[in-house]
Amino acid sequence: MSRQTYFFLKQTARNLKQSWGTQLLTLMTVSLSVLIFSFFLLVYINMINASERLGDELRLIIYLDHEVIPEMQPRIRKKISDFAEVEKIVFISKSEAFHRLKEQLGGEQDVLDDLGADFLPPSIEIYPRRNLHNLTQIKEFSDYLATLPGAQKVQFGQSWVERFGYFTELMRVIVMLSGILLILATVFMVSASIRLTVVAKEAELEILRLVGATNTYIQTPLLIEGLLQGIFGSSLGLVLLYSIFLWTKMHLHGPGLFSVLTLQFFPVSTTVMIIATAILLCTGGSFASIRKYMRI
Amino acid sequence: MSRQTYFFLKQTARNLKQSWGTQLLTLMTVSLSVLIFSFFLLVYINMINASERLGDELRLIIYLDHEVIPEMQPRIRKKISDFAEVEKIVFISKSEAFHRLKEQLGGEQDVLDDLGADFLPPSIEIYPRRNLHNLTQIKEFSDYLATLPGAQKVQFGQSWVERFGYFTELMRVIVMLSGILLILATVFMVSASIRLTVVAKEAELEILRLVGATNTYIQTPLLIEGLLQGIFGSSLGLVLLYSIFLWTKMHLHGPGLFSVLTLQFFPVSTTVMIIATAILLCTGGSFASIRKYMRI
Amino acid sequence: MLKSFSEDRPFIDITKVTKVYPPDIIALQNVSLSVDLGEILFLTGMSGAGKTTLLKLICCMETPNKGLIDVGGYDLSKISASQIQSLRQQIGVVYQDFKILPRQTVFQNIAMPMEVCFTNVKDIRKRVDQLLESIKLTHKRDTVAGKLSRGEQQRVAIARAASNSPALILADEPTGNLDAEISEEIMKLFTELNAAGSTVIIATHDESIYRNTEHRRIELEHGLFSRQTQKKQLSLTGLMS
Amino acid sequence: MLKSFSEDRPFIDITKVTKVYPPDIIALQNVSLSVDLGEILFLTGMSGAGKTTLLKLICCMETPNKGLIDVGGYDLSKISASQIQSLRQQIGVVYQDFKILPRQTVFQNIAMPMEVCFTNVKDIRKRVDQLLESIKLTHKRDTVAGKLSRGEQQRVAIARAASNSPALILADEPTGNLDAEISEEIMKLFTELNAAGSTVIIATHDESIYRNTEHRRIELEHGLFSRQTQKKQLSLTGLMS
Ligand SMILES: Nc1ncnc2c1ncn2[C@@H]1O[C@H](COP(=O)(O)OP(=O)(O)OP(=O)(O)O)[C@@H](O)[C@H]1O
Ligand SMILES: Nc1ncnc2c1ncn2[C@@H]1O[C@H](COP(=O)(O)OP(=O)(O)OP(=O)(O)O)[C@@H](O)[C@H]1O
Ligand SMILES: [Mg+2]
Ligand SMILES: [Mg+2]
């Protein structure tokens, strides 16, 4: 076994030396593919994060014709929660509403002094769960809330939600389509570079079969090669992605921006998964491509 | 010449028949590359459109301590325009401000009846030109406006502008990075498929040179092939893109969304440009790749 | 020597074999032949007679349409993939188109069959150097094979076939690009290998290499055996069908 | 016939040519030779002597390190790319490794040099069919060349070299894979071509094809001319250097 191991290492080293051009090409392909794929994964993940954060600001307000007495609150809570899961429900009394307005007016608040503290209607603020981001769903929810006893009018930042919904929807479509295109490109690139490698090795594989090389003898160096290429290629791709990520983060640094959105990189587990997948694809791809030489 | 033309057409037909696998691969590569490239171009163009449309909603408001008499307006207009080009400047008097608030309050407007029509300050609304989208620039402009005589306070939808600016910035970075990655992928794909084609043709080219084939004899069929591949490949890519475009448009169809954004396809000139570029690349690429066979 | 082989049977036994290439090119027709262990056999015949096809059948590169082939105790119609591998390790073939690797050195080309059998490095070096001397290419040891002349390449192909000291050597036109002097050297090499236990089959057009030997010669004509000389009185099984 | 060529000069004139392959492999050393128009010349010598190298120099596949080569009135050291092209259209070469296209048919392979000269389709067909008869491969006309036996491939290579009725034919080991009978046919073909005006140079090891002819033979040894026979009393310029 030790002599065999030595042979295989020698064989791999020789292959690497003899076909370093093709090897480098494959390495670059793997890096580029991993980079492209993980780039879009990262964009997608951050987009979802962002939409969740922005979704936090969504609230629906039910203006009521009279205040809800504390004893009634649990029943209304239940009625609301029955329809859709919500994050938080806040009951705002007339006076609370008045105080808020006052705060909002800031310097101008003395204009309110003449008005009674109860000129504003009481309301219920509802912060829906994050799964309720679709405009139609929000509208349905809003329609439902309008049927609650005492509800005068239901409001939500319709234009904001529409605009935001449009943005996320468009982003999702773009990311999805890019993803499909890029997976096609990646598949193409990897298969083209494997095809180039096999073309270069065709004659050698044929002769190896003819002098009676065993499957182990032929496949082991390929396995090692695939392993090395998977590891180095994907690591390189991920390092590049991380550099881009850091650059973007720095580039986008501005006051207050990160209160809205924080860019996040992959957790370690995802990184490991990406590398593992790359290794699997590299070895699997080269195995599949020499399959026809493995018969007899 | 007519016999030569016949020869070349025959040669091309033979090539296409003999290496249809590789030809198809190249065709698909060209299509995919054109698709990917024009997809991102389209996204970019529509993003710019969108940011212009959304930018329309940006306005700065200067609250004044006293009304601007109509005779002063041209001077102030000039002062403002001196600093930055603006789309529109609107002077709002106390009463106009009051009427607006009333409209905004809708049903609740009677609460204002007791207040004087002049409890709100007069203001100037400034709609900047589209080139003023950068947050820092807007801030500078806002600071400048604060120095105008009588200016109490300058307001703009800071959070909205920040958020929007963040979005467009992020989108721009994403589109830019994707563009770079995809151009890399495209270059890789095209060169890999040309390399595969040349590998397949190597022996034939060598022998053609050895039996004294002229440059015209060798290059003309390649030229025709490149032409065909450029035309069909890029057309296919563009047709696919147009299908995706239509699908996206339908998919995103919702009430009111298109008041904010309208998706647009390339004008005919851009389409023609893309096809021409693809043809150039296809023929240029294959010419470059057989360059070494053209010596001697 | 092949493990499963018992000495009382012919080493190669071909019975009524027909090989038809698609669509309908009859390369061999109802051919029977047996070759004894340790024999040297010449296979002659016009261009296109089926010599190469017969050799390809013996080393499992092609399968017959009809008939049975038995090599060293293996029935080739029932042989498993791993058995083919170990059989091929015991057969050295000089291909008519050489099949050497133009980008590997002469040494690497010749060492390949030994590397496949995990022979240790010292033995490989010794054997290759010894063979290089026989084929008079010691000075080209580390030259890339693609930069050799055709005759030199042919000699490399011969050395590769011999390198593993195989039980069976199939040489297809081994002297086609070699001059008389070197052809003689090569024949000497084959005789030595034969003396060391290898069975040798040589397909050739070169009259000079079989004219003065006493080995059996079989002549193929359009896929049929047309004539055979039996000098050594060894096997009588190889018959015109 | 080459346009720029005047008949009173030797057709090929090689003067003190040295060819060294990198790094330091001396393939030809100070070789001088002249070949007259319409001559048949045999080039012999051991494997690795430099025969192929000499032929490659004549058809511009390699450039000499020293010395002058003049072919049909062209000085090869000053020849332009388009002149090389028209010169090559006038030279038919049988490469030692054939260089036929395995995925094109026999017809396409043989027709190639004529297609390159834009010969019309009828003439191509006539010529190819005529050649196929000479090389006895009429029945393989539309077979893909990769599926032929080596000897058949060699004949295709010979037919391709002859197809354009070139002014000069360079045949490198043209009978290496052919039996005596077909070799004779091939020699007959070369003689016919020569009678029709082609100058023919044949590099070979096969004694039988030059033994009974009265053509000049030059023997190379380690890149030097070691011997030459001058039967026809034609040219005296080819000298040992
Ligand atoms: N491309 C090359 N690079 C390096 N050396 C070469 C190259 N081609 C040939 N040689 C060497 O030059 C010498 C002469 O080669 P050449 O092919 O001319 O021999 P040859 O007479 O044709 O032999 P053969 O009968 O074997 O074909 C040989 O030693 C060969 O190894
Ligand atoms: N792969 C193939 N497909 C179709 N026909 C083939 C194939 N290989 C060989 N043939 C045909 O089978 C016949 C016998 O071929 P084979 O190679 O056995 O001849 P050979 O005796 O070796 O001839 P040579 O001396 O020319 O090498 C020939 O007519 C050849 O054209
Ligand atoms: Mg053969
Ligand atoms: Mg030679």
Image: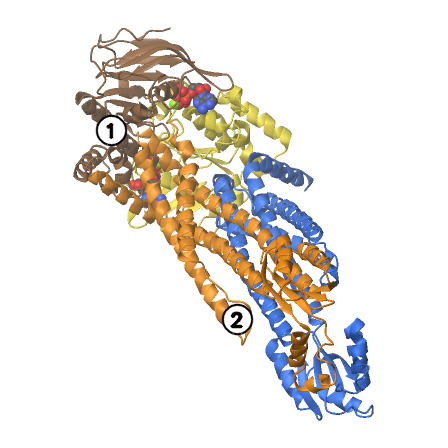
Chain colours: A blue, B orange, C yellow, D brown
Name the residue located 40 percent from the left edge and 44 percent from the top edge: B280
- Pick whichever, D185 or D14, lies toward us: D14
- Residue A56: image tag: none
Q: Label 2 is placed on what type of residue?
A: Phe
Q: How many marks?
A: 2
> Mark number for residue B258?
2
Q: Position of residue A122 (x, y in %)?
A: 76, 86
User: Element at badge 2?
Assistant: helix
Q: Is residue D61 above or below residue B39?
A: above
Residue D87 appears in which quarter of the rendering?
top left
Q: In the image, residue A35 lies at what x, y percent? A: 62, 51
Residue A77 to residue A235: above or below: below
Say few, some or many: other residues with alpha carbon within 10 Å of mark 1 (under 14 / 14 to 19 / 20 or more).
many
Judging from the image, mark 2 belongs to the subunit labelled B
Q: Nearer the viewer, residue B117 or D136?
A: B117
Q: CA distance from mark 2 to mark 1?
A: 74 Å
Q: Name the quarter where the C terminus of chain D is drawn.
A: top left
B232 is higher (above) or lower (below) than A109: above
- Check disc 2: other Cα within 10 Å, few if <14, some if 14-19, many if 20+: few
Residue at the disc numbered 1: D162
- The residue that appears at 36% across and 12% down in the rendered structure is D68
Q: Nearer the viewer, mark 2 or mark 1?
A: 2
Nearest to the observer: residue B86 or residue D154? B86
Horizontal relation, residue B119 to residue C115: left or right: right
Could you say whether the residue bearing mark 1 is in a helix, strand or loop?
A: helix
Q: For residue A108, which quarter of the picture?
A: bottom right
